[in-house]
Amino acid sequence: MLAHTGREEAREVALAFCKALSASGIVVRLLAAEAADLGIDPAAYSPAIEVAQDEDGAAADCELAVVIGGDGTILRAAEITYGSRTPVLGVNLGHVGFLAEAEVDDVQSTIDAVVERRYVAEDRMTLDVRVFRDGELVTSTFAVNDASVEKAARQRMLEVVVEVDGRPLSRWGCDGVVCATPTGSTAYNFSAGGPVVWPGVEALLMVPISAHALFARPLVVAPTSVLAIEVLARTEAGGVLWCDGRRTVDLPPGARIEVRRGTHPVRLVRLHDSPFTDRLVAKFGLPVEGWRGQAERRRREA
């Protein structure tokens, strides 16, 4: 279990989960720092709560990772579970919370679903991200939502050339470039003017940020494609690579960033078999009054 322990509401929900799951005979594992934040005595629970001293290997042999917080906390959980491929169940205490499956008002029903194993894991595409300097690989990492190349200095524009499948596409003077998965299409990609892509679509997205160019449109390419961004050597200031808004790599002039489909997906837990359209409507509060679709008519007739 992972929680945003800096928030009182998250601490209360985490304690409720610990008590209920332990009472049902389920072993709960917490990071040592979070157990301390929650004021938990592991031996006071039966079965006893396990404590992991650090994040490395914390999710090994776990059936499920329950995450209490917003999308940032869920992305942190994705980092911890990426190697073990432990499914992640998010309980949203943030704002929009697109990665979360349950809301804070659904805590009891979520606990019941975990105890009774009434959930399924859904695979979501990830990104493999590599950074090269002078032709040498210097960083290799991954992203669940997006990998963005951004200018490091606010007052200077970033000069880049973008490439798709080994062929140059265009040169942009811009604030940055976002490469995203369909899962991340409702995150930074959305704010940058990119398309919303349904999670079932296999594709990679590339969206320029405030580009000074005639051709600066959002791109949707095949999942087998390789996207590349080169920071021009003549650029006066370097850039920075952000992966999921959490991990950063400095990019000097001349750096090259390659983005491709991840070698294995991240696993998000689903409790309800609801269409992604309904999630969009609920999360963004979209106006649908007056709709008289066939499904609605059948529901009313029934």
Image (cartoon, helix red, strand yellow):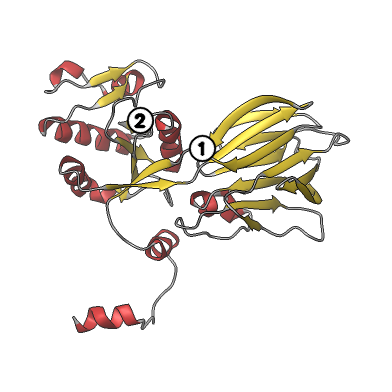
Residue 290 location, quadrant: bottom left
Residue labelled with disc 1: 263
**Position of the N terminus by quadrant:** top left
Q: What amino acid is at disc 1?
A: Thr
Q: Is residue 170 left or right of residue 123?
A: right
At mark 1, the secondary structure is loop
Residue 271: percent from left, percent from top: 27, 51
**N-term mark: 1 or 2:** 2
Q: What amino acid is at disc 2?
A: Thr
5 in relation to 271, above or below: above
Outermost residue on the right side: it is 234
Residue 173: percent from left, percent from top: 81, 48
Residue labelled with disc 2: 5
Q: Residues within 10 Å of mark 1 (few under 14, many from 20)?
A: few
246 in relation to 267, above or below: above
**Position of the C terminus by quadrant:** bottom left
Which residue is drawn at the image coordinates 54% and 49% (left, top)? 181
